[in-house]
Amino acid sequence: MLLAFFDWLATTAGSIALHESLHAYRIVSTVHVVTLSLFVGTASLLDLRLLGATLRSVPVSEVARRLRPWTMAGFALMIASGALLFYANPSPRYQNLFFRVKMAMLVAAGINAWLFHRQVFPRVADWDSDPVPPRRARMAGGLALALWAAMIVSGRMIAYDWFDCSRQPQSALVNLLQGCRTESH
Amino acid sequence: MSLLPFFEWCENADLIVAMRSSLWLFPAIESLHLLGLAMIGGALLVVDLRLLGFGLRRQPVATLARDAEPWLLGSLGVMLPTGVLLFMSSAVKCYYLPVFWLKMATLLTALAFTFSIRRRVAMAVETGVHPGRARVVGSASISLWLIVAIAGRFVGLP
């Protein structure tokens, strides 16, 4: 089971070192937060263009193509630093309600991007220079923006211990959603 | 005269005391500050990368600067008030924190630079600004704002 694996992961030397270190953890968390402005910043520009809210005179395909390497670089840094932050505290993160919400949003954002690139973007030539793209493109852009915002907010909330498994009693729903090990089990 | 009494007053202002007694208000303000950080990144980078010769290279810098401006002002409109509230809630800690003073000094420099030199160069590039000069302005902008962001993160750390 995953929780047993994360309990084991927490006993590995690297996890303990990162958990105990002051500077390494601070640097990794700083990279994670500051890269937000590269990753979500450049991704949002494309989403806002899809909504017709900015760069209306620039073809959509040009915005997508030219910003992609920067968004991808930001994404790689986000995932790498995020994985390290998780590695420093595996089980508490895994059982954190906000962390689970954030991961669900990440999956939803991935599906939204995949559907967009499969179903909407291939026909971009038909509306590339339209100041306001068609409805399907606007929906993908708007949904992406909402999901980024939800990810940022839930990510910030991970630091708050309101729903920690160790702070019982919690409601049955919270315990279920986080997979807390409760006494009755 | 020491600024410390002012910082102590900030921390004990009625508004801040009320904010501290709320469970969710402080995290909500932190979240807004982060949402602003994401937005300001896009609004700054689209112009700075172009000044450096990357990103939307085929577009005139002035077009990008004009399109980015409302988003830049909007994100500052979110970040500055939320930042003031976050500062006030732990003003005395900030007073003794060198990285807080570094952030404030760099922030004022970055704001002054962005709305004077950077704006003038971005708006004038097609009328003949040396690409070398555009690159200097782009790197200066990225460096200044990056220091503000990194120092800001360190102010917030426990």
Image: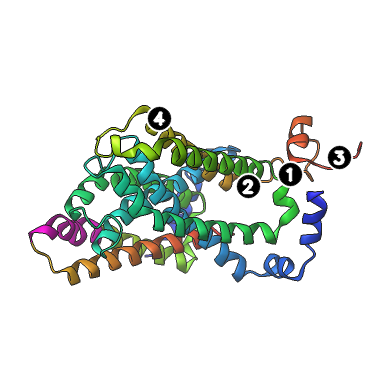
Residue position for label 3? A182
* Element under disc 1: loop
Q: Identify the amino acid type marked 2.
A: Ile
Q: Indicate left or right for A149 with A64 as reference.
A: right
> Residue B113 at x, y = what percent?
24, 61
Contact flag, marks 2 and 3 (Cβ < 8 Å): no
Front: mark 3 or 1 = 3
Mark 2 or mark 3: whose residue is earlier in sequence: 2
Crowd band around label 1 with a 10 angstrom C-alpha radius: few (<14), some (14–19), many (20+):
many
Q: Is residue B125 magenta?
A: yes
Q: Residue at x 68, y 41 (%)?
A: A97
Residue position for label 1? A164
Mark 2 or mark 1: whose residue is earlier in sequence: 2
Question: Label 3 lies in what chain?
Answer: A
Contact flag, marks 3 and 1 (Cβ < 8 Å): no
Q: Which stretch is magenta?
A: B112-127
Viewer-proximal residue among A23 and A83: A83
Front: mark 2 or 4 = 4
Q: Identify the amino acid type marked 4.
A: Arg
Residue position for label 2? A158
Query: How far separated are the C-alphas under marks 2 and 4?
Result: 33 Å
